[in-house]
C-alpha cells in the first residue's frame, strides 16, 4: 500500500551552512493498524505532542512509540499497542480521513482538497505542488509538528491532485 517517495520530492533543504530537514529520518518499521489492519508508519513523539488535545495528553504517559494510520475510512489516527487516538483526540482536522472538512493536505501552507478542487474546476490546473515546493525553500516547513503524519505532504498532494483530476474528468 505504501510507496517510497521519489527522491526529488524529498524536502531536505540546505540553508547556508545549516541543514534544515523537515523530514528527520524516522524509524521505518511499519505496524498494522488494530482497526483496519493496514500497515502504518511510526510517528515522532513531538508530532503527537503538538497535535493531540490536552485532554488526550492526560491519558498518555509519553508521546513516543505511536503509529499514524492514513487509511481514509479508518477512524484511528494514532495507535500504540492497544492505545488508540481518533479525530476526537486531535487539535486539527485530519484531512486525509474520509468526509472531513477542511480536508487539509498541506498544514504548513494551508492547501486543502477544497482549494485544489476549486482551482482545478476553474482552470483545469493547480499550483499546489509548485507553491509548496517554493515555500519549503522559503520560509521552510514544519511538517513534523503541523502535519498529523509528521512527514512531508508532497506525496499526499500529488495523490490528491491525481484523484481529483480523475473525479473531475480532467
Ligand atoms: Zn487504521
Image: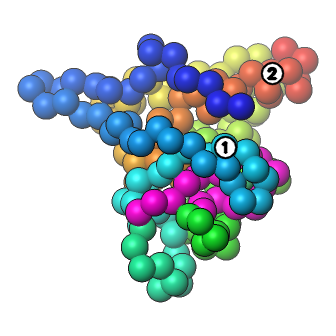
Image disc number at residue 89: none
Q: Is residue 168 visible?
A: yes
Does residue 131 appear left or right of residue 2 in this picture? Answer: left
Question: Contact, CB < 8 Å: mark 1 with mark 2?
Answer: no
Toward the viewer: 98 or 28?
A: 28
Mark 1 → mark 2, Cα distance in angstroms: 27 Å
Q: Tell me the SS state at disc 1.
A: strand
Q: Residue at x 51, y 84 (%)?
A: 59
Percent x, y for residue 72? 77, 47
| Residue 147 counted in the magenta span | no
Q: Quadrant of ligand 1?
A: bottom right
Q: Left or right: where does residue 4 sit relative to residue 34?
A: left
> Which sits in the foreground, 7 or 34?
34
Residue 32: image location, x then y, percent: 67, 49
| Marked residue nearer the N-terminal end (1 or 2) | 1
The picture quadrant where one finds residue 49 is bottom left
Q: Give whichever of 100, 88 is nearer the camera.
A: 88
Residue placed most toward the observer, 69 or 105: 69
Residue 74 belongs to magenta span? yes
Does residue 97 sit above or below 56 in this rendering? above
Q: Position of residue 34 (x, y in %)?
A: 72, 59
Q: Determine which residue is flagged by label 2.
A: 165
Indicate the quadrant containing the N terminus: top left, top right, bottom left or bottom right.
top right
Image point 64% across, 70% down: which residue? 82
Instruction: Name the image quarter holding the C terminus.
Output: top right
Q: Nearer the viewer, mark 1 or mark 2?
A: 1
> Taking the image as drawn, is residue 141 in sight?
no
- Magenta region: which residues? 64-79
Q: Is residue 61 left or right of residue 42?
A: left
x then y, percent, for residue 110 = 54, 44
- Which residue does the numbered mark 1 point to in the structure image? 39
Amino acid at each position: 500500500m505504501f510507496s517510497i517517495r521519489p527522491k526529488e520530492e524529498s524536502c531536505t533543504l540546505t540553508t547556508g551552512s545549516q541543514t534544515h530537514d523537515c523530514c528527520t529520518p524516522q524509524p521505518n518499521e511499519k505496524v498494522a493498524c488494530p482497526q483496519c489492519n493496514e500497515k502504518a508508519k511510526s510517528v515522532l513523539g513531538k508530532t503527537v505532542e503538538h497535535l493531540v488535545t490536552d485532554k488526550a495528553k492526560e491519558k498518555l504517559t509519553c508521546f513516543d512509540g505511536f503509529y499514524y494510520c492514513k487509511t481514509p475510512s479508518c477512524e484511528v489516527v494514532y495507535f500504540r499497542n492497544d492505545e488508540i487516538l481518533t479525530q476526537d483526540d486531535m487539535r486539527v482536522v485530519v484531512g486525509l480521513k474520509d468526509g472531513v472538512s477542511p480536508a487539509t493536505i498541506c498544514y504548513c501552507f494551508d492547501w486543502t482538497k477544497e482549494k485544489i478542487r476549486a482551482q482545478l474546476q476553474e482552470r483545469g490546473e493547480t499550483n499546489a505542488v509548485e507553491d509548496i515546493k517554493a515555500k519549503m525553500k522559503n520560509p521552510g516547513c514544519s511538517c513534523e509538528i503541523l502535519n498529523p503524519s509528521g512527514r512531508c505532504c508532497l506525496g499526499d498532494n500529488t495523490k490528491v491532485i491525481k484523484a481529483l483530476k480523475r473525479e473531475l474528468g480532467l
